[in-house]
Image (cartoon, rainbow, N blue to C red):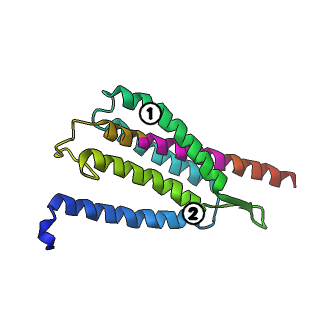
């Protein structure tokens, strides 16, 4: 099949997906390898992700007009908090010989993180026929329950990152207190 058979909008979406896969691959590699627990980094990363995600959710088309989307929003945050707690629970956390706290994500971390992302893209594609609907999309402005659910999955990510940061910080402070008593 010739390359010209692919519409330009689909080609650009595949390029965007390719770029996202490369960036996520690098991020997953970094999160899965051992690294010291850095409190400031945890807070800044979680803060940036929360701000960007909440802005993205709030600008989703029709999100404030759909009672189901508004009703599911708090549930998405609570589920995200639970997933974040699970994420920390399955992460490997240990104290080095010099007393520093270290963490490593592992396969369950990657599965939880990527699973929520794939689900969001699948819902968006099911509802719109596009991975990244734009203002020119024929369904943009006519949101469906699937697009609203995809937007609410953004809030699930908020809960996940908040719980992750809070629980790792708690473990860090417990480690600091234990080190001070030695």
Q: State which quarter of the image contains the N terminus.
A: bottom left
Secondary structure at badge 1 equals helix
Give me the residue at 57% from left, 64% from top: 32
43 relative to 153 in the view: left or right: right
Task: Identify the residue at horizontal 34%, vertical 47% (top origin).
Answer: 123
Give the x, y percent position of residue 41.
Answer: 57, 54
Please tell me which residue is depicted at 13% across the width and 73% down the height of the picture: 2
Pointer 2: what residue?
A: 107
Is residue 59 shown above or below 133?
above
Q: In this picture, is 122 found above or below 73? A: below
Tell me the SS state at disc 2.
helix
Is residue 104 in view? Answer: yes
| Frontmost residue, 176 versus 93 | 93
Mark number for residue 25? none
Question: Which residue is the site of mark 1?
Answer: 73
Give the x, y percent position of residue 52.
Answer: 41, 45
On the rendered image, what quadrant is the C terminus found in?
A: bottom right
What crowding class fits label 1: few (fewer than 14 Cα within 10 Å), some (14-19), or many (20 or more)?
A: many
Name the image quarter holding residue 127. Answer: top left
Q: Residues under labels 2 and 1: Cα distance? A: 28 Å
Q: Which of 55 and 105 is in front in this view?
A: 105
Q: What stretch is highlighted in magenta?
A: 153-169
Residue 165 showing in the rendered view: no
Q: Residue 47: x, y in percent?
A: 50, 45
Q: Quick check: 20 left or right of 48?
A: left
Q: Nearer the viewer, residue 175 or 180?
A: 175
């Amino acid at each position: 099949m010739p390359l010209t058979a692919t519409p330009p909008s689909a080609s650009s979406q595949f390029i965007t997906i390719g770029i996202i896969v490369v960036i996520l691959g690098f991020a997953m590699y970094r999160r899965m390898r051992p690294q010291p627990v850095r409190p400031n980094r945890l807070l800044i990363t979680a803060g940036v992700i929360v701000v960007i995600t909440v802005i993205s959710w709030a600008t989703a088309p029709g999100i404030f007009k759909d009672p189901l989307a508004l009703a599911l929003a708090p549930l998405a945050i609570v589920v995200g908090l639970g997933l974040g707690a699970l994420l920390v629970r399955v992460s490997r956390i240990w104290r080095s010989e010099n007393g520093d706290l270290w963490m490593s994500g592992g396969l369950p971390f990657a599965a939880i993180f990527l699973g929520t992302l794939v689900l969001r893209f699948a819902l968006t594609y099911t509802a719109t026929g596009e991975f990244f609907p734009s203002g020119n999309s024929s369904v943009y402005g006519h949101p469906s329950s699937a697009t609203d659910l995809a937007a609410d999955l953004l809030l699930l990510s908020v809960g996940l990152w908040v719980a992750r940061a809070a629980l790792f910080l708690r473990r860090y402070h417990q480690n600091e207190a234990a080190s001070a008593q030695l």
